[in-house]
Each structure stands twice: as C-alpha cells, then as structure tokens.
C-alpha cells in the first residue's frame, strides 16, 4: 500500500500519512514492498537487498522563546541496537548528510516535518538514535541564533557531547521489506541558554515522537498575531507540546501527542490568557478541533499591565550540562493546574526573567465538541490573580518552588533558588 499524501491546512509542507504498520516498541509506520530482484520499499526512494528494511528520519520542532531564528547544522544520524553503546562502539549505522544541512528550527513548528534522510537497515530491534551536529568551525557559524528584533547571527556554544551525538534512547523495530519512520522533535525553546555577556549555549532538549500526525488544531483571531501568541498542550502543568500560530492564517497545530487529555494554555502580550481544559486526543491519528477560521479564538485585552518575576536559579554542585528551567504556575479551584510561562536560567550568572506575566486571572473553557467554546471568568485561580507559584527544576536535582509570588502591584526581582541533588 502506497502512502497517501495530504495537505495540512496552514502548512506549506506535504506530509506523508503512512498506512501500513511496521510494528515494534516505537509504533512507527512502514510501507509494503514490491519485489523485482531487489526489494523496493514503497515511498522511501531506496532500493535494498532482499531481507532488509529502511529507516527514514525526519525533524520537527516546538517554537523558540525570544528568537527569530535558531539554526543547527546536522551532520549525521546514527542508530544502534544497543541503548548503552557509546560513539566508538561497534554496531552503528549512519545516515550522513553530505553536505551537512543548516536548519532553522523555527520553520518546523505546527506539525511541519523536514526529511533528514534514510538508510537500509538489517531487520531487528533498535534502541538508540544519535543526532550529530557540526561544531562551529573557526570563524564560521554552524549553530546560531538571531534574537528577536535583531539581525545579527550569534554563534551557539556547542558542547563536545553534542558533536559526538545527542543521545536519544528510543525503541523501534525494523521489519524486512518495510519502512520504519522516526521523527526527532528538537525543542528550541528549552534548548537555548544564555551564558552572560551576550553569549548563548546549546543544551539540547530532544525527543522522538510518533511519525503519524495527530493532535489539537485551532485558529486564533488574526488581530492577535502581533502580540506574541503562544499555545501549549499541558498535562498536570507540564508542557508536552507548544507552538505559535501561522503568521498568515492564525492556525496553530499541537501535533504528535500521545493519546490522552490535555489542557491547552494560550497567552499573548497584554491580553487576558485562556485555558481550555480536558481536550481529548483519542488516538494516534485523531485531530481535535478547538476553533475554525469562521470563529477563531480571541483573547480580550487585559485590564491591568503585566509584570515580571526575576531572580537567580543556580545549581549546587555546578553542572556543565544542566541549567534550571524556571516556570510560573497557577491552578483553578478544583483544577486544572497549568504553566503560564517558562524560561531557562542563565548558564553563567544563574539569572532568569519570566517576562510579561499576566496580572489578571485567566479565562477557562471546558472542552466540548460543539463550537465555539464558551469561556468564563467565574472560577477562582490559585494562588490568586497576579499571583504565581514559581518552580525551578533541573535533571538530577530536587525541584524547588516559592508559592504566592504576588506581582499584582509590580515586578518581583528577588525570587532565588539553589537546587541540590
């Protein structure tokens, strides 16, 4: 069976929906084959010897916070059947990009996929993927950012561990005569850290997500698009996926979500935020609609000015690979809880700034299949309007929080953390 090709509204990329399952722990899709001496894996463009399969790798991204471009240069993708294999062990199969490909991750949100390449593979169970980036050579810039409102391309400090390959422990099977699809999700927002003195570093936050497109779809009022609209799907206050609306259509798409219920949080500068509770994603191919072009979602102007929460979030002992992620959180009486905004602390100074936090209580809508959704302001928010629980976390360290941080009368500048193992 050949893959069907469909256009996703608001996207300029054709996305292949793969219909024949290849099975295995990762749940990735594959295609049937035709045999003419060798094996041709339908839809892959790769001919392999009988008995082999094909691995096909693509890249996607969540939006970045405060940047107009986040560029990485991909050198190769490596796969191994052993989850514990290091970069010098045997058993690696490489997809080499020649020449290496410089990619602006911010072009890859709202479900967009960028194919990276494919390779024949011996059938079997695979447990590790590595995404290998080029280092910044001499005066060249392989990995870089462009801060919002600027034009200068600033190099990203790229750790040696990234050059050896960003390790992704993920289970998937390759079957004889079939194509296994792997999608690498690079979260640019969480992966860029400041390092003081106008310098930036790369702390990759990367995961493998399903190749089949499912998720949550909606449209924002076009009049809001100049106010930095940010949309996230959350579970228990943890951000699972995030995106920004299409600049022309207002459409947003939170794609490749594990089946379950999500709270969708929508923020925009100087607007009243909104939360849509209990949005279902029924299965690996379903799409839940929150609004349409005729009745887009809207956020009313806030009645009071936003404010900032800032301070420091450090690690003891200091880590060369981790930095704290700081988030401002609230909850409605009886739920749900949600993250309003989040940011990485500076890797050198430990400073952070949660900028432009709303000082008004968010609106709440319970999901219903009948559109348009109805938002109300009659459910109390905790710890209160203009008040937040500020949380700091880092891998390998205990999470810390300060509750009842009140910005209703102005900025708070001294909310400090020291995280310990």
Image (cartoon, rainbow, N blue to C red):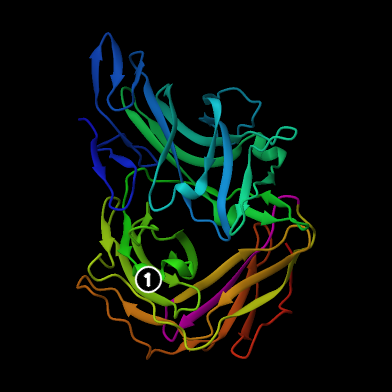
How many labels, in total?
1
Residue 130 position, x and y percent, is: 56, 35
Is 322 colored magenta in this rendering?
Answer: yes
Nearer-the-camera pick, 139 or 116: 139
340, above or below 219, in the image: below
Q: Which quadrant holds residue 262?
A: bottom left
Q: Is residue 200 left or right of residue 361?
A: right
Q: Which residue lies under the disc numbered 1?
A: 223
Could one spot residue 394 in this view of the protein? yes
Residue 271 position, x and y percent, is: 46, 78
Q: Which residues are magenta?
A: 320-336
* Residue sitting at x 67%, y 57%: 396
* Residue sitting at x 22%, y 68%: 294
Nearer-the-camera pick, 214 or 258: 214
147, above or below 46, in the image: below
Residue 169 position, x and y percent, is: 53, 41
């Amino acid at each position: 069976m050949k893959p069907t090709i469909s256009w996703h509204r608001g996207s300029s990329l054709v996305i292949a929906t793969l219909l024949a399952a290849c099975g295995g722990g990762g749940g990735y899709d594959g295609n049937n084959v035709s045999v003419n001496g060798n094996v041709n894996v339908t839809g892959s463009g790769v001919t392999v010897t009988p008995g082999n399969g094909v691995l096909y790798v693509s890249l996607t991204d969540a939006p970045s916070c405060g940047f107009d471009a986040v560029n990485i240069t991909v050198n190769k993708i490596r796969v191994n059947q052993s989850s514990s294999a290091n970069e010098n062990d045997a058993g690696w199969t490489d997809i080499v990009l020649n020449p290496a490909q410089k990619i602006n991750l911010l072009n890859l949100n709202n479900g967009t996929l960028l194919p990276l390449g494919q390779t024949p593979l011996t059938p079997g169970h695979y447990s590790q993927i590595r995404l290998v980036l080029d280092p910044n050579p001499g005066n060249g810039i392989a990995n870089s950012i462009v801060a919002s409102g600027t034009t200068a391309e600033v190099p990203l400090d790229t750790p040696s561990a990234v050059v050896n390959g960003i390790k992704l422990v993920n289970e998937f099977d390759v079957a004889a005569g079939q194509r296994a699809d792997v999608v690498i999700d690079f979260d640019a927002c969480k992966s860029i850290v400041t390092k003081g003195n106008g310098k930036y570093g790369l702390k990759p936050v990367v995961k493998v997500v399903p190749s089949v497109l499912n998720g949550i779809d909606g449209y924002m009022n076009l009049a809001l698009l100049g106010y930095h609209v940010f949309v996230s799907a959350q579970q228990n206050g943890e951000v699972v996926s995030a995106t920004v609306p299409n600049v022309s259509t207002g459409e947003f798409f939170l794609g490749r979500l594990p089946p379950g219920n999500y709270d969708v949080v929508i923020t925009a500068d100087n607007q009243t935020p909104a939360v849509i509770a209990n949005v279902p994603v029924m299965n690996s191919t379903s799409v839940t609609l929150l609004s349409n072009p005729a009745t887009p979602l809207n956020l009313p102007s806030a009645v009071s000015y936003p404010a900032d929460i800032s301070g420091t979030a450090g690690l003891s002992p200091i880590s060369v690979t981790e930095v704290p992620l700081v988030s401002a959180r609230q909850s409605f009486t009886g739920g749900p809880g949600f993250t309003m905004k989040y940011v990485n602390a500076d890797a050198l100074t430990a400073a952070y700034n949660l900028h432009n936090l709303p000082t008004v209580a968010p609106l709440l809508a319970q999901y219903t299949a009948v559109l348009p959704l109805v938002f109300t302001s009659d459910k109390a928010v905790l710890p209160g309007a203009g008040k937040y629980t500020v949380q700091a976390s880092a891998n390998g360290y205990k999470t810390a929080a300060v509750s009842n941080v009140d910005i209703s009368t102005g900025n708070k500048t001294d909310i400090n953390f020291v995280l310990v193992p």
